[in-house]
Every structure is written in C-alpha cells, then in structure tokens.
C-alpha cells in the first residue's frame, strides 16, 4: 500500500489515511493540474477563485480539502454547503463526495427541486456534514425555517458562471449573506463580470487559480461540417450510422430535441431526448440508461451543457451551433474528460456561420472540416 501511495501524487498533500483510502477506492491516479494547485491552497485554510475547463477534476479539487477538514473535526461542528446550477449536477457532486469520503463517514444531504420538502426536512433534522443543492431549493428551505444557513462554515459555488447565467444571482447573494461562512470558494470554467462581482464581495482574499481560460483541452478534436438547414438531419444521421460512439446531440430548443430524437428512433437508433420540460424522475431515468449503455445517443438542450458528468462520453454534436463561445465551451467540455479523447462536430448552416466564426475568433482556433471517413 505504501509503495502504491507514493506512486500516486495525492500522498504529497499530507491527507489523512481515511481520505487517502477514498482516493484509492475511486481509482484516482495522479492529481489533475487544477487539483494540484487548488488542494494545497484549500488545505492551508484559504478560499479560491478557480477557473478550469469542465472535465478537469474540479469536484475532487474542492471535495478532498473539505473531507480532510471533516476527518480532523472530531466533533463535526462544521457544516459545508456546495451550490450547483442544476439538480443533476448536485446529485453527481454529492455522489462523488460520498465516494471519496466513504472512510471518513461524512453525512451528505442533497437538497434539490422535484423532491419532497418533507423528506428533505427529515434529512436536516437527522443532521449532515455536507449539503449539496441548487440555490432555489436551498433558499426555500431557509425561508421555511427548516435549514439553518447560519451554521454553514464554508461554501463552494460549483459551475458558478452557469448558475448566474440561469438567473440565480440574487438567490446566491442572499444565501451567502445568510451564512457565517469563513471561506467562500468559486469554481467555474469561465469568470464573467457577475462572478467577479460576487467573488470580490465574498472572497476578496481568495487565491486566484486560473487554468486553460477558454482554450479547449488538447484531448478534444474539433470539426465543422457546412450544411444547408434542410439537410442537417440527414448529415446527422450519416455521422451516426455505423457508429456506436456514446454521443450527445445538442439542439437549440426543447421541441427540436424531441423532434430530432423521435426521427432518429424511427430509423432504429438507440436514442432518447432530455430537456427542462421533463419531470426530474424521467430525466434521472434517461441519464441512467445512457450511463449504462442501454442507449448510446442523447439529444439535449443547453440543460445538459453542464448538468452531467459522463466520463466515457466520446462525442458531442452541435446540431444547432450555440450563439456564444461560453455555451460552445461547456458543450464541448462534456467530452474529453479526465484526459480521455473526445470530438466535437458542429453542423454549420448559413444562419449559424456568423456565430461559428465568432466562436473561432474568440477561441483563437481554426476549426477544420470534418474528414470524410
């Protein structure tokens, strides 16, 4: 065990044996760049404002210092709050914290919409060490007098730019004002102005750790296919035919996601769609089928651009080109995660060309045509 531990770079952080066992159980090998920079800073008691691409390992970067503090706190007097923009991401983050903290014995509660308020009130009364949730439900529980935010000693904002994009600025601000947190840390793929404003207010002394910027990770290959709007679907089907690659196809609207999925299903593809109109239980079931390989295609709206973490995802197809570079970045970040290879293919119709050209300019990259294979 000691030989293996020394071969793993995580030993150098001085983590307790209980935390380190969780790292081994999770199958982690060496720290990613964001983990290597964030973990020592947070272990030293400092907050961070960390920018790194999706798929770079940010969850473990903030989870491991949190678990280390919990393992040393024998009275378990501290409480931790992790805010995420979506329900799916909240559940994934909670699952990862539980997995890494199995030997520490942390109690993790998930507070999201679409679930029983009464059941979540029971979780609060039983006690927890880490709460993971979406801003709306956390604030709802606080306003009902169920959740005491004043007992929270540390707050993590995960994918905070997406959170604020979704209109949660006021909710997040009120949550932060209601805690007695000694540390507030921000994790995001981009740091726009509204994130800067919150960070200046609540984490003025935080250590800034900026990796990657808007540059796509090297494990992702980017391609474009020029198409007429009317031929988009047929080009999509040509890409998918004869391939079993796990793929997410992004569309601009909810109705379009359903239309594309139904047409693909009629042609024999193992496909499902997922969007914000679906009940939470249905979305969870669909994601489970995708992760299990029961289906290998998901057609989705922007909801999934940051709402899921599927390590093995091989390909992203932009059926509709996003209108800004941040959306492109986060869609692309679904694949090529944790050092794996991935590809992003954009179907560029005449009405998409200006937006696509802006993406290329902003990313400072020339996206080549998709090779005929």
Image: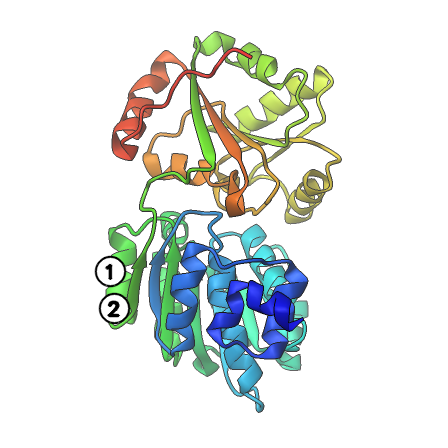
Tell me whether circle 2 and circle 1 mark residues in contact (CB < 8 Å): yes
Q: Residues within 10 Å of mark 2 (few under 14, many from 20)?
A: few
Marks 2 and 1, Cα distance to the nearest angstrom?
A: 6 Å
Q: Nearer the viewer, residue 17 or 9?
A: 9
Q: Is residue 175 above or below residue 134?
A: below
Residue 369, position as x, y percentages in the image: 41, 16
Q: Is residue 108 above or below residue 316?
A: below
The dot on residue 329 is: none
Q: Residue 118: name its quadrant.
A: bottom right
Residue 163, position as x, y percentages in the image: 41, 53
Residue 355, position as x, y percentages in the image: 31, 25
The residue sitting at 56% across, 63% down in the picture is: 8
Q: Does the rendering let one see residue 140? A: no
Q: Nearer the viewer, residue 24 or 250?
A: 24
Q: Which residue is mark 1?
A: 197
Q: Residues within 10 Å of mark 1 (few under 14, many from 20)?
A: few
Image quarter (top left, top right, bottom left or bottom right) of the N terminus: bottom right
Residue 230, position as x, y percentages in the image: 48, 8
In-image side of 93 versus 222 (left or right): right
The residue sitting at 33% across, 35% down in the picture is: 325
Residue furthest out toward the front: 3
How are the colours assigned in the image? rainbow
The dot on residue 201 is: 2
């Amino acid at each position: 065990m000691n030989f293996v531990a020394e071969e793993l770079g995580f030993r150098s952080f001085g983590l307790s044996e209980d935390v380190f066992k969780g790292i081994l159980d999770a199958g982690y090998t060496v720290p990613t760049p964001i983990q290597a920079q964030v973990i020592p800073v947070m272990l030293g008691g400092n907050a961070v404002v960390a920018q790194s691409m999706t798929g770079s390992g940010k969850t473990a970067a903030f989870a491991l210092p949190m678990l280390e503090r919990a393992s040393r706190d024998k009275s378990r007097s501290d409480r931790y709050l992790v805010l995420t923009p979506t329900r799916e991401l909240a559940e994934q983050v909670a699952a990862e914290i539980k997995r890494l903290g199995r030997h520490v014995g942390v109690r993790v509660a998930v507070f999201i919409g679409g679930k029983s308020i009464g059941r979540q009130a029971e979780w609060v009364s039983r006690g927890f060490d880490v709460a993971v949730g979406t801003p709306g439900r956390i604030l709802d529980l606080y306003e009902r007098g169920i959740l005491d935010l004043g007992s929270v000693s540390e707050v993590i904002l995960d994918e905070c730019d997406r959170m604020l994009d979704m209109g949660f600025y006021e909710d997040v601000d009120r949550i932060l004002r209601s805690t007695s947190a000694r540390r507030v840390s921000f994790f995001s793929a981009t740091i726009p102005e509204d994130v800067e404003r919150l960070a200046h207010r609540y984490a003025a002394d935080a250590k800034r750790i900026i990796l990657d910027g808007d540059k796509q990770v090297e494990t992702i290959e980017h391609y474009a296919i020029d198409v007429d709007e009317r031929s988009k679907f047929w080009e999509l089907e040509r890409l998918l035919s004869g391939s079993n690659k796990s793929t997410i196809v992004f569309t601009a609207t909810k109705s379009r996601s359903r239309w594309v999925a139904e047409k693909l299903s009629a042609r024999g593809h193992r496909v499902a769609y997922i969007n914000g109109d679906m009940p939470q239980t249905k979305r969870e079931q669909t994601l489970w089928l995708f992760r299990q390989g029961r289906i290998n295609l998901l057609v989705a709206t922007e909801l999934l651009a940051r709402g899921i973490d599927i390590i093995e995802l091989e390909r992203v197809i932009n059926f509709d080109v996003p209108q800004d570079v941040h959306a492109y970045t986060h869609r692309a970040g679904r694949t090529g995660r944790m050092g794996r290879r991935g590809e992003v293919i954009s179907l560029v119709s005449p009405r998409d060309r200006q937006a696509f050209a802006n993406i290329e300019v902003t990313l400072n990259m020339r996206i080549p045509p998709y090779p005929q294979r």
